[in-house]
Amino acid sequence: MPAAGSSLRIDRSQKTLRELTLEKMRNAIFGQYFQPGQRLVERTLCSELGVSRTVVREVLRHLETEGLVETPQGQGPMVATIDTETTRQIYEIRALLEGHAAAACARQADEQAIARMGAALMLIEAAFAQHDHASVLSETTRFYEVMFAAGRESVAWSVVQSLNARINRLRAITITSRERSSSGPAEMRRLLDAIRERQPEAAQQAAETHVRQAAALALQALRQEQPRAG
């Protein structure tokens, strides 16, 4: 007789169907497979994704909480539009929080955390070289998660996480530019060097500069798209 509960144990390493669908939809929005303002029809999504309507509805509700989907009154769900004012505010929040966390990290990070940030940055550079934008996004999130944790800025990181889907959506716009594949990692390298050298002010300045450069690219791209959208 098998041990009690042995056949019922959940394999926590496996993602659920809902998690896989959510990940697929996020990446489709980041990659602009679904365009801003495009209607998201449940029946069509069920067919494309090969999942039930229940799963699709749960995923759409979750994406709405992340700011990636919106449901205007009297209409069905659609991909949320990106306006320049919201974008400007998101980057201002990022500069404030990331700059503060970078300084804290330079003061408090142990060598293990710095090594983990270095490993993430190497993966970011490799992903840029291979045009693997999904990995650029995931490893960039990992880099900053370690930085905030090493600086003991858990509350600030929770704020960043609440915006992370929209942050990654904007990152997906900027990282496709040819210049960002070199300038982005170089800016992050300067940030990491300042942290490694225990220079809080330099780390804060490097973090803020990196965000401002990304903001300029994102706002430029959005302004170029606006006439077409109209």
Image (tube, rainbow, N blue to C red):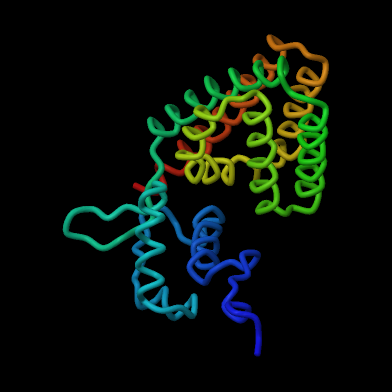
Percent position (x, y) of residue 187? 73, 26
Q: Residue 71's quadrant in the figure?
A: bottom left
Residue at left offset 82%, top offset 15%: 197
Q: Is residue 30 left or right of residue 60?
A: right
Residue 53 to residue 93: above or below: below
Residue placed furthest toward the bottom: 1
Residue at left offset 70%, top offset 52%: 135
Q: Is residue 202 left or right of residue 74?
A: right
Percent position (x, y) of residue 98? 59, 24
Residue at left offset 65%, top offset 34%: 144
Q: Residue 105's quadrant in the figure?
A: top right
Q: Residue 115's quadrant in the figure?
A: top right
Percent position (x, y) of residue 203? 70, 17
Residue placed furthest toward the left: 74
- From the viewer's side, name the closer residue of 150 and 190: 150
Q: Quadrant of the N terminus?
A: bottom right
Percent position (x, y) of residue 36? 41, 53
